Structure formats: C-alpha cells, structure tokens
Amino acid sequence: MTSSRPSDTHTVTTTGGDVRGVLHDDPRRMPAGPVAAFQGIPYAAPPVGGLRFAPPEPHRGWTGVRPAARPGPAVPQLPSALSWLTGQPTPEWSEHGCLTLNVWSPADAVRGARPRPVLVWFHGGAFAGGSSGTECYDGARLAALGDIVVVTANFRIGPLGYLHLPEIGADNAGLLDQIAVLRWTRENIAAFGGDPAQLTVGGQSSGAYTALLLALSPEAGPLIRRVIAQSAPLNLPAQDPHQAAESTAGYLRALDVPAGTGPTQTAAALRKLPVEQLLDGYRTVRAEALRAGRTAPPMYPVLGGAALPRPPFDAVADGALHGTDVLVGTTADEMTAFLTHDDRIRTADRAAAVGMLTTWLGGDRDRAEETYVRYTARRPGGTPARILTDVASDLHWRSGVTDLAERRSGPGDLTYVYRFDRCPYGEGDNLTGNGDGHDENGGRGDGSIGTIDSVGASHCAELPFLFGSFAAYRGSTLLGALGGPDDPRRLRAEALFHRFAGALAAFVTTGSPNGAGLAPWPPYIEGADEGGVRSFDEGEPEHPAQATRP
C-alpha cells in the first residue's frame, strides 16, 4: 500500500463544499513526486426514493470540511462473473451515497503550479458491475508517472442504470451519471490542479464503450478533447428500443410488478422494492437471456434514449469524432476470460466447433469452414476450443477496434491502436517458451497458447499495467506471481507499466502516445492490419529512458 498522511495543505473547495485529501508520498512507488488523493466526493444526490431510476440531480452540498480519504460505496450489483480471473471480491455497495468520484493529482498542481491534463476513466463490468473505489483503480501511480490528474467515478449500472422505462424517467441513467461526472469535472477540476480544457475520457470494456458514446453525444462531446477505449465491445450495437422493452417486460414479471397499471403506479412499485430484490430480478432476466442464446447484457445503453440519438458507427462515419484524438486497443486473448469455463467450448471437437462458427457467422457453413482452417493455420496445434476462442476474440473485440480505426484514418483524424500481449507467469505447460510462460526475454514465446486452460492476455490483462496496481491482483490468475521487489518478474512488470501507462498518459497530455523516453508508436494507417498496431509485452526491448528501475 502507498504510504499516506492527512495534509491540511490539500484542502480544496468544490461546488459542493470543502474536501480534505490525503498525500501519497512513498518515493519507491511514485518517484516522480507525491500525489494528493481525494476520494468519495459526491457529484450527484443519492439516487434513492424518488430519484431511483431518475436522471442525476445535483448534490445539496455540505458544511465544514468533508474528509476525502476513502472511496464511497459501490453501486448495488451482483457478484462478478470474472472474479475467478481477477481475484476481486464483490465491492461493498449501498444505494445511498454511491454516486461519488475520486481525484488524484500531482501535489504541486494542487498547490497552484501549472494545470495538468485530466483523464476521466470509467470502469468496466458488463454494464452491471464494478466500482471506482477498488484498489485496482487507484490512480496515484498513474497520476505520478504521467504527471496528469486522474478521475474515476461510480455510476449507476444494471437495472438501476439501464432499466428502460422512459415513462417513469428510467432512460439511460448510467450514461447521464457519466455526463454529470464530466460536468462536475469541468466545473471543479481546476481547484485540484487540472486543466478543464484538456479533458480525456477513457475506460475499459463497458466503460470504454460508454466513453466512446459520450464522445459522440451532443451533450458530452463538446467537453471531451480525447478518448481512450480499452477493450471496448464495439461490435455490440446500441440496444434496440424494442429489445429493451422486452427486457423491461420480463424484468417487471420477475419482480411481480403488474404491467399496464400506469406509470405512476409502476414507478411507485419499483421505488418501494428493496434494492436486493431489484438485483434478484436482474439475475433472472440475465439467465433467461442466456438460455435464449443472447449474449448481450439484458440492460445497457438504449438507442434513441437519453444521450444516444444515433448508432455510434453512423455518427463516426459522419465525422462526429472529427477533431477528437482517439486511442483504442484490445488484449490478445480477450475471450479466454469468458469461455475458459464454458463446457460447450471446452469439449468441442472440430465438427462441433465448425457448427458453432456457422451460427456465429449467420449460418454460412462455407465461411465457417474457411474461418476454422485459417485460424488453425495461425495457431498450429491449437485445440478446437482454442480456435473458437481466437475467433470470438476477433469477432467481439478486435474487429470493432479495426473498424473504428479504418473509419477514422482520413486526413487530420489520427487513431492509435494497441494490442496488449503480456501473459501471466506460470502458464508454461501451455505456452511455448522457457517453462514460465515467457521466453528468455520475458515475452510470450511465439504466442502459441494451445489450450483453453491458458488465459493468455485475457480481458482485463492490461489493467494492472495502466494503474500500476499489482498488489491489488496479488495471487490472481490474471496477473500471476511477480515475486519480491528485486524479482526479475516484478522488474519486467514494472518496466511494462512504465511503457504502457507512460504512453497512454502522453496521449492524455498531447494527443499522441509518443514522447521523450517512449518507444515510437505511429498512428493507424488504413489497410495496415497488424502493421498499424502497437504491441505491448514484457519481451519488447527497453527504450533507453525506460531502462532504469522506478
């Protein structure tokens, strides 16, 4: 943990009142200098009672100085399906006081030195889980390394954020919460040493998806200078209003809330129910959707609803991101996170795999056969399960990123694309290399993960290397063992943190992930395929300025 001490010199005045932060000043973790942290700051009123499902309302504020040393509670949610991978427990949650945010800023910026660029970053969680208050997303090291201000926030998710019932005011509330975060940041971040005119919105997974929606939104787009989208499921279309209505009808049935009684009665019934019952109803509709073969979440941003007037790619094609800097990427093996424990995938033989591909590809058997052969050639010795996982990773994640980059490859619109390749240590039985999952230089060997049992560079793999939050993932399948402070594995991980987080922080600052001490990263060029993608792994050569240990 980072050493911390209260500091009266880091009391800041916001539109809601004064907050007192904590100084993080451990030189071993933040050699660039101390960082002031302010956590659990309310940006909207508690979404309870009549405000449940409603658009966010301003917080009433407080008198005196509010301690800001601890994050607020998470938004109510079910346990994560990826806890086996990340090692993260379900965060403590409460509907009261959940709409809070956290700010990390170089200490001298808070004292009045030159303002720093700002990254507002939204967590993932399939639109139904996650919390900005977990140690995974502690922004202190990123703020120190990049000399930027980092903001993370909670926002409504699951049924509280994406129940689609406009007649009672339930209309993309999660997106509206995120817009409220951006507006709060615009109004208050100068007091924390941030430059409100240099605002980047970013996120991972569903948080990356909504970051892009915000940049395209008429309400939020003008506030945003740059976008970072990590592992965004860009091939997921915004939810059709008719499908959203069906999900809502099923949800009301699961809750035993009568339909057709009128919006006033429906709203009263939903706002009276305990939040635990709302979550149980969501569990039911999610299970029903999966049984019906629908892999999309039952509740997520709805097309035509608040802040989402057009299909995202239509807006991109019409130039809605023109003048906005964009950085996007994926991990190499996204879908291992979701398919490793799927028995249908694990036990598939070639015939079954081709059958599944036929379904995924709209019933085109010939294309499925060709796809299977092509992917097998890319991964010699790969099992059918492994081939299916590779195809799914491209279909659901990588192809959407490529599509976005291709659409933005015109004059004046630069897009930077990455692929995160780092595998956890201890996968040597299924990876080529020296037996620890890496070759003698710390890389992936030839990247040949033969079986589904190897998670490889799975969904979420880059997160510890953005925030430098290795301690939060200690013992997890996602990260693997790093050893002590002088262990070569840890030193390689720290170096990769400097390369990856340093490049993204440079993008926040200038719109380009290039700069002093960083390896060259050219923008994506149309038709370049992998040649236009920056790979991040522990085996890549050190750039001279990165060769020293932090």
Image: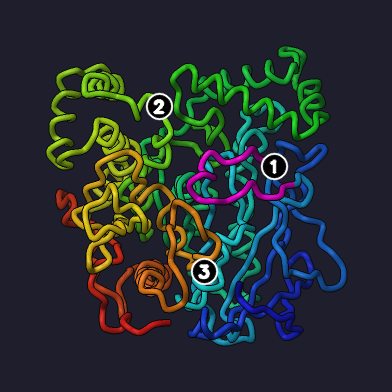
Q: Which residue is mark 1?
A: 76
Image coords of residue 205 (percent x, y): 45, 46
Can residue 404 be seen in the rendering of this structure?
A: yes
Magenta region: 77-93
245 relative to 62, above or below? above
Q: Residue at x 61, y 43 (%)?
A: 174
Q: Secondary structure at mark 2?
A: helix
Q: Which residue is mark 3?
A: 118
Relative placement, left or right, of 216 versus 539 is right
Image coords of residue 275 (percent x, y): 76, 35
Asked if the stretch drawn in magenta spans residue 219, the answer is: no
Q: Nearer the viewer, mark 1 or mark 2?
A: 2
Image coords of residue 248 (percent x, y): 62, 22
Q: Residue at x 39, y 37 (%)?
A: 340
Q: Secondary structure at mark 1?
A: loop
Image coords of residue 415 (percent x, y): 29, 57
The crowding category of the residue bearing disc 3, from other C-alpha atoms within 10 Å (few below 14, some 14 to 19, many at least 20), is many
Measured in 3D between alpha carbons, the distance from the residue under mark 3 to the one under mark 2, in whole angstroms, is: 44 Å
Mark 1 or 3 closer to N-term? 1
The crowding category of the residue bearing disc 2, from other C-alpha atoms within 10 Å (few below 14, some 14 to 19, many at least 20), is few
Q: Quadrant of residue 326?
A: bottom left
Looking at the rendered structure, the kind of residue marked 1 is Pro
Relative placement, left or right, of 142 versus 35 is left
Looking at the rendered structure, the kind of residue marked 3 is Val
Can residue 411 be seen in the rendering of this structure?
A: no
Measured in 3D between alpha carbons, the distance from the residue under mark 1 to the one under mark 2, in whole angstroms, is: 30 Å
